[in-house]
Every structure is written in structure tokens, then in C-alpha cells.
Image (tube, coloured by chain):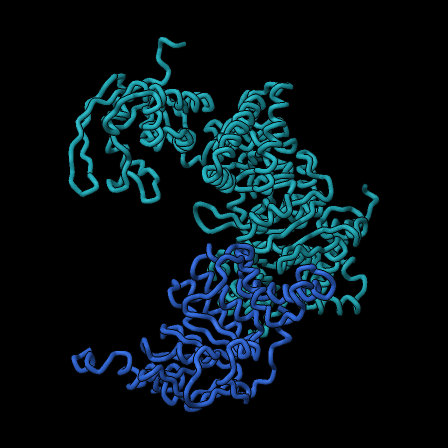
Chain colours: A cyan, B blue
Amino acid sequence: MAEESQGDRLDTLPKLLRERAKVLGERNVAMRVKDRGIWRCYTWRDYLEKVRCLTLGLVRLGMEPGEKVLIIGENKPEWFWAELAAQSVGGVAVGVFTDCVANEVRYYVEQSEATFVVAHDQEQVDKVLEIKAQVPRLRKVIYWDPKGLWNYKEPDLLSMDQVLEMGREYGQQHPGLFDELVDRGSGEDVAVICYTSGTTGLPKGAMLSQRWLVEGIREWSSVDGWDRPGMEYLSFIPPAWATEQGLGIAGGLVAGLRLNFPEEPETVQENIREIGPEILFYGARLWESVNSMVQARILDSTALRRWLYRRCLWVGLRVADRKIGKKKVGPFWGVLWWLAFHVCFRALRDRLGLSRAKVVYSAGGALSPEIIRYFLALGIEIKLFYGSTEMGVVSIPRPGEIRPETSGRPMPWADVRISEQGEILVKSRYMYSGYYKNPEATAAKLKDGYYCSGDFGYLDEEGHLIVIDRMEDLKPLSGGRKFSPQYTEVRLRFSPFIRDVLVVGGEDRDYVGALVNIDLENVGRFAESRHIAYTTFTDLSQKPQVIELIREEIRKVNRTLPEQARVMRFVNLHKEFDADEAELTRTRKIRRSFVEERYKELIEALYTGQKELAVEATVTYRDGRQGVIRTLISVNEVEPRQCT
Amino acid sequence: MREMEQACVNDQRPKRVLEIKGLGLHFGGLQVLSHVDLEVMQGEILAVIGPNGAGKTSLLNCINGFYRPQRGTISFRGKPIQRLKPNKIAGLGIARTFQNIELYTGLDVLDNLMAARHIHMKRGALAGALFFGPARREEIRHRKVVEEIIDFLELEPVRKKIVGMLPYGVRKRVELGRALAMDPSLLLLDEPMAGMNLEEKEDMARFILDVSELKAMPMVIVEHDMEVIMDIAHRAVVLDFGNKIAEGSPREIVSNPRVIQAYLGEDEEAAGG
């Protein structure tokens, strides 16, 4: 290894590109992009040629090693070429999200000291031109989609085609220059700067090295089994985000994923179906919306189909539960699942573009365990990915180890510790190289060599990492213990019988309590089916059977919670939280402190051991009149003492 | 888009595309247009404005042959067209959109646009159905043109959607697309922004300006929204009760006392507005 010259070692993305093009050449497709209704292909040789010309074009325009190229645009091959070209010159790519406004663009250009901007289209170019005079360091603006820019006369504005042509000519005059530049790169070079939106202060630019991209992704892909060249991948998460840097840009070069680019952000769902990607990364929200889309479509479907779907899903969920419970699926359920798959799941997965999905991730916020269970029923293992720009990939469930709650065991290269406060601390071989021009912020995040994630979580008995919430959103309990109200609330709300819930605790309190709003419609239906007569919401909420129903729902959730976060006592509220009474925001989020103040007595009762409490509440009727409800509310224990 | 760029006319000298002289139209005793003179230059966006019932849409209907004017001449590139049938006029390269969208609501966007290419298709129905040889090549060629338009008007997400299911603003855009698919050399737009929200209006205005810039396409726009006219039109003509009462740049028009009078009415002005 030591005798190899720097050019031979494949430690940077441009070197890898050159190698791939040499081996896979012009017969293998590296990228596809849907344009004018047709999937157009770029072979590995095309990919290299574009990057080569763009690199030389940038050199011709005066770009020096170490300079930054800011890239702002949707996922398109041009984005990738620009990044690789910037790195080939010896510079750094800086990714920016397309939805930021001109002022933010100015901040990024200034902070990163970018000298070139590569922009997608008129929309992005307009932003850059608006602020160009304020950042004299910025020399050229290069765009790739000429629509609407035909009559722009700015002297420093060029089309990518122009730059490519310049590079082609320059290459003829300077043969060998490209290879020379690429050979100079090393694994320790900063490859890209990704801005992370902190909850406080201005975004910080996290520097990722070539080693992070090349070695880190190589290990990740081999652990997770997507290192087989030619696997289909649809690139639609923003390349300005470290995840797409890893999966799309590096994944394409390191693992040989075949990159597909959607026609427009709005056509992603359609394009996913056309491509049938084998590796997929959705945000938690997207999984939820796919799930609810299916539910809605099924409701609109014919009775026979609905019936079939329900039967099949029942089988699927049984199998999913066995897998989650680490039980063997067995031949009986195996055959039933096979039938359900061919009757229903196969077609359903095809509709969703998941027919070939093999490695499937979710990140960005808590994903309800029910969603994971649902997709597992269809035979899709969603892996809750835990990582960040700074820490890289920290933990991912391995195949066959899918549990709805956990992010799996830490990766072989990551050392995870939990601090006394419950904060997740990470030391990893593939971490970022610090914040750009901000060593104080970098140092502030490090403690004894470990990176402080700011996330609250724990490792379970099997060594799986469970991430609960941001540290700053936690609530205290007596004895310094902490819990995350939102984590519990999200899970409780997934029950069809619970519409809203407020989970409470406090420094002087021993355990967690909950105020529950039953879901009138679903609980009402439950009551009807059990022949339980009721008059009003208040009446229904206090029926012993309904209390038992809610108790069972809470118990189910409790089993998945860490000991101190389990809900011990609850009340079913006699009225619904109401936005008109300022208990909820208009987007139906609970106004925590207001509600806690309003139901002070009830919350107190959760901790005094009373069995019942008389309450009076003023309610505002639809017509604006106000009335007073007087009623007895029962305070319930989740685990009655007579049961062990 | 490259093909479109090549089509971009370099010759910027103003050429007269459409010339209307002494146009008169009446339905029985109702005088709809009387003695209207009008010119449209190459590359120009001409706005026709006026109060309700001023004869704006009738003027467009005369140009594209729906109505036969009783008096006057309309010449398109020097050729009189006032006696031609609408399909002939369309064949000469005058395309239009309608105030109340006239699309095939049961077809998808792609088929609507392909249908507009019909006037350029030479192969018979049988050859088209067999989709063989020249007919196939022809279809592919036309599909390319249509795809350019889809890209241009950002219709990709709705390419395969049934037009009847689309929101109003998008349908308007599809209708503009269909007019463009005819590859016209004069575009008549009848209230392209009526009933749109602000964002849709801005988008539409941008598309209209793009078409004008890219193809130097002359356009006649009938529109109520003065703000839009101020933003996009090069020149405006004001009609009132079938008479042309003013002509000039949008800025001149809004300050013209006769125009203000026509819009506000004499009585109201006398009453103190």
C-alpha cells in the first residue's frame, strides 16, 4: 500500500469515477434522468467526460485548488457533475437547499467564501444575481437549465454547456491536466460542506472529507448489503443534505448504485414506480403519507378488494409480529404470507414503487412503530436510520433485526455511549472534520473525544439504540430522571381510540401521568358494537368499559417505553381539547403550559391517589353560548395492584 | 428547448403581422364593432381592453373566423383572411385560447396537446392506427414537439392526468399549451388569467413573456386585469361599445381621460366617483 503512488489509491471520489469509467466504460449506465418524458442514460464514460470537461472549464475560468463552488438546484446529473468537478480541481463543493431565499444564499456564499456558483435554473440564478454585487468574491455564476435565461446579459453568467465546451477545448490544449489534478487529491481533503440548520443561531457548515465519503460509504454499503453494482436508486433527497452526499453521490461511485433522477420534484412518486428502486430513503413523514394514501384508496375500493386486503393484511401483520418478537415464522404462516403476497401485497407494492425495494431507510423524526409494522407486513423492512451530518451513520438495524422502536445496533465503526443525563455520545471513525471557520462550535460539541449529539436515548438489553427526543424537549421527574412527553404522546395518539393526550410529570413527581381525550367517533363505534348506551362525550368517556379500553391501549404503549417514562395513572377528560378555548393551536398542537394550568386540579389528582374528582368546566357551544358541566371524573391506574 | 432557441427570430425589425382596417360587425341592429383599426407587429404583445360588452371577444372571433365581419378587412401577413373558414385560418398559423376553456376534458393533457398537432399531421388514420414506418416516425416527431411544450409550461406532473380532473389554473395552462402546439405565428389569448389566484397569474404572465421572448411571437391578449397589462403588454388598445377609443403604451392608456371615463362611467364621475 505504501508503495502505491497517490494517484493509484482510490481514496477520492474523482479517482473512483475515473476507475469506474475505465472498468465499466460505455456499456454500463451510471445515471438516468427523465427528460421530455423519456429516461435518458449516461454511461460511466459520459459521466467521466462531463466531469472532465467541467473541471477543465472551471480551471479555464480561473478556479484554483481550495476554492469553493456553491451548488444550488434540484437533483439532476448536473448537480453531481458540478460537485465532482469542484473536487477534481481540488476545491470543495458547498450544497445549498433550493428553497432558501436570496438573503440566505448571500449568507452561504459569504460564509463558505465561494467563488463560483452553479445554479439550476432561472429561479436560482435570479437569487444569486440579486446578491452578487454584495459578495465581490463571487466570480462566475453557471446555470444548467437555460429556460427563461435567454436574454440575460450579465457578464459573469454562463451556461454549463458553455463551460463544458470551454473545458473540452482547454483539454485539447492541455492533455493530461485532468489526470494530474485528480491525482493530487487525497483522502483527507475536504470534499463537501453541508450546512446544518441549528435550532439556534445561524447554520453551520459541516465539513465532510473524501475519506468520510469514500471509506465511510464503502463500509456502510457492505454492512447493509447495497454494495452490488448496478442496484437502482432514485435520487430525490436534497444533495445539499449529507445523506444524499452519502447515498447518491458517494453511493453511486463507491457502491456503484445506478442513479435515477426524477423529472420534477412533483413527479417523484410516479418516477419511483417507473424505476422500482432497490434502495430507498424516505423521511418519516413520507412513509406516513404513503400509508395513509393506501388506507384512503382501499376505502374507495370495491367491497371484495377491501375484504381481500383486510384478510391479507391480517396475515401480514401476524407474520410481522412474529418477526418482531424474534419468533420463527414457520411453514404455516410462511405459506399464508406467500398467498397474501401474491393475492395482494405484490400488486400493492408495485403501485407504491416498492416492488423491488430491498434496502429501505427512514429518518428525520420519529416514525410511528405501527407504520414500521405495517410495511413489515408487506415484506418491507424499514430501517430507522440514526445519524447526522456531524456524526455520520451511527446505527441502523441489520437485516432480520427490525424492531419497531429501535435504530438497531451501533455500526462497527461507531462507539456509542449514554451520558448520565441520557444524552447519546458518539465516537466514530467517520465523523465530520469540524465546522467550517468555526472551531469554537466544533469544540463545544466534543466531550472527552465523544461527539455530543444532543439527542436523548438509551441502549436496550440487546444493545439496540433507541432514540427518544431532543435533550432540550425533555421533562424532569423526581430523582433527576427524565422522560420525553412527545415520544409517549406520539405513540399513544396512534391508537384509534385516543384523539389527543397530554403526558405530564415534574421534578416533584414520581411517575408520569396522562390526560386523555378519547376519540368520540371510534370510541362511539366501539360502544355501539358492545351495546353500551351513552349520552354525551362526558358520559362516554367515564364508562368503565371505555376506561378499560384506554387502559389497555396505554398498557400496550407502556411495554415499549423505558421504565421511568411509563404512564402510571390517567384520566379520560370530560371534554375535548378545543382550539376555540386556546387549548390547542390552530394546527392542533397542544398548548402545554396553558392546558397544564387549566387542568391543574386533575393533574394534582393523578398524584394524590384519589379515585374520583368532581369537576366543573365551562364549555363554549357552537353558537357561542357558554355552559357549565359538572361531573365526576374517575382517576385510573394503568396497572391495578391486584394484577401482578 | 434547443429547437425552440433555433427558431428564435433574430430579425428584430418590426414587421406587420396582422392588420385590421375599418372592421365593422353587427348582429341585426346591434352594432358590436364599428370601424376598428388595429395592427400587430412582429414580436409584440398587444392588449385589448375595455369594459364588459365592449366587443373584445368579438374582435378575436372575427380574427379567427368565427364571425364574419360585414365591413372592413383583416389581413394576416398581407393576405386577406376575413372570408376564410376558422380551420383555414388556424392552418395559416393563428391559434387562440378561450375565455371558458375549451379542452377535451375526457382526455389527458398529452392527448390534448397531441390533438393540436393534428393540423400538421399528414398520415392517414389507418397508418396512424397501425403505427408503422412513416406514421410512427411522424408520431414521434410530433410527440417531441409536444414534450418541449410540456417542459416549457412545466406540465410534467400532469402529463398523464385527465384534463377534467385538473384545477382551473392548470387547465388554462394546458390550453395555452395546446395553442402553442399548433406552432402558430400569431397567438390570440382570451382572458388567460381570468379566475386565477395571484400566484397562478404570476406564473401565467411569466409563461407568456417567455413565449414572447423565445419565439418573438406576436400576441393579442384580451384581459381585464390592468396590473397584468401594465406588466406584460407592449401596447394596448381600448374598446368601448365597439369603438376604439384609445391606443398607446399601457402607461399612456391608464392616464387617458377617455379610458377612465369609459371604465368609471360619466355619472359616477359627476357624482364625485
Q: Is residue A642 left or right of residue A259?
A: left
Q: Is residue A411 left or right of residue A501?
A: right
At 53% across and 26% down in the image, what residue appears?
A317
| Between A148 and A452, the one nearer to me in the picture | A148
At 54% across and 68% down in the image, what residue appears?
A136
Examine the rendered structure and indicate whether residue A497 appears above or below residue B271.
above
| Residue A365 shows in this picture | no
Coordinates of residue B128 in the picture (x, y in percent): 67, 63
Which quadrant, please, contains the N terminus of chain A? top right
Identify the image quadrant of residue B267.
bottom left
Identify the image quadrant of residue A280.
top right
At 59% across and 72% down in the image, what residue appears?
B119
At 60% across and 21% down in the image, what residue appears?
A333
| Between A377 and A601, the one nearer to me in the picture | A377
| Residue A5 shows in this picture | yes
Coordinates of residue B252 in the picture (x, y in percent): 36, 85
Coordinates of residue A80 in the picture (x, y in percent): 65, 54
